[in-house]
Amino acid sequence: MRSIGVAAAVMAAGMLAGCHYRLSEYGLHHYIAGKLAAERRDYRAALAELTRAVSIDPKFASAYTTTGDIYRKQGKYEKAAAAYERACALDAYAFRPHYNLGVTYQLLAQSAASPQLFADYIAKAVRVYLRAVTIRPHDFDANLNLSACYYQQGKYDLAEQYCKVSIALDPNNPYARSNLALIYDAQDRPHDAIRAYRQSLERDAHQPSVLFQLGLTYMRVNRLRDALNAFELAARQDPRWPAPWVQIGTCRFYQKQYDAALAAYTKAIELDRNCDEGYRGLGVVYMTQYIQDPTKVALRDKALAAWNRSLELDPNQEDLRELVAKYTPRLTGPGL
């Protein structure tokens, strides 16, 4: 029975390798042992067995792919990438190592130490995803991930192209449609973006981040009532998220509902004591009220206190720093 199982596994491994390289029974034995150890989450033993497998059969592409899978689960993305790269070099027609290498490059980009390194990893991901969609053109995830990488590169036409491919492959997927909406927003096509956001929400109504983005796009086209509704829905769906409350405050401010705006900004700060946008918003409302009635000096002082707190949390607000300098009262008196 064991020999039959090994023979079947040899055939399967040969198909995965994608070439005419014949694996040895010894290399395959260690590969199977490594796979079984990985399933038990005994990754040290699994890696040891896989290392033995490739030492016996250096062209064992599937062993490198499995090694990459283990390293990726461990968060060792550079080692995972190296293993997947080797698997891709050995088998140019294997979809899985190409796709997983693209995912790994994206993960490395997320933790990149510099913008240039981020750009380099995304460029590598694009190249390998292009290979993946050539191997398997109808793979939803590969097309969607390629679209996301093009979006991060600012190549919005290509991002739109591959995102639409993914939508054609899975018309009911809400995430592809919300991604398309983001692409439209980046192309300054707010009405197309609104339509795509709404189509995403029709397929999954519980998406607070999509509702939030929809609200921001409504604000861009001055549909404040619709924006407010979207932000309020986002706040209800994610009660611990301060960002919708900041935008609710902004909508209420534009509607000149100052008490409601103050309440919303205060709620954002209650949810996050380090919410610099909440403090900034409070300051704007207080200062607006003070300008309307300069006798209410306490409002000016509240505004300055809120703005200074916002600057402590985010010093990169030059416009706010100028406002603080403009409205801070100058000391007067003898010798001054």
Image (cartoon, rainbow, N blue to C red):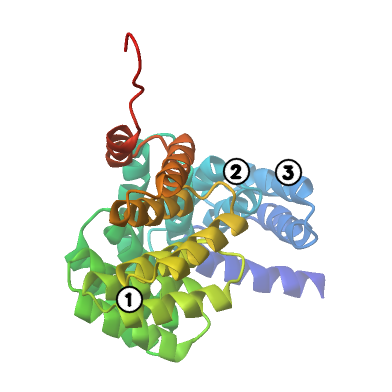
Residue 16 visible, this angle: yes
Image quadrant where residue 58 sits: top right
Mark 2 or mark 3: which comes first in sequence? 3
- Mark 2 or mark 3, which is nearer to you? 2
Q: Which residue is mark 2?
A: 76
User: In terms of secondary structure, where does tag 2 sit?
Assistant: loop
Of the numbered discs in the image, which one, if any, rests on residue 137? 1
Residue at screen point 40% across, 84% down:
200
Q: 223 or 80, which lies in front?
A: 223
Q: 8 or 255, which lies in front?
A: 255
Left or right of residue 334: residue 83: right
Amino acid type at image mark 1: Pro
CA gap between label 3 and label 1 equals 35 Å
User: In terms of secondary structure, where does tag 1 sit?
Assistant: loop
Left or right of residue 224: residue 25: right
- Mark 3 or mark 1, which is nearer to you? 1
Residue at screen point 42% across, 46% down:
303
Residue at screen point 37% across, 64% down:
250
Looking at the picture, how far across and down is residue 142, in whole percent?
39, 69
CA gap between label 2 and label 3 equals 16 Å
Q: Which residue is mark 3?
A: 48
- Mark 2 or mark 1, which is nearer to you? 2
Q: Residues within 10 Å of mark 2 (few under 14, many from 20)?
A: some
CA gap between label 2 and label 1 equals 29 Å
In this rendering, the answer to whether 235 lies above or below 51 is: below
Amino acid type at image mark 3: Ala
Mark 3 or mark 1: which comes first in sequence? 3
Residue at screen point 74% across, 73% down:
5
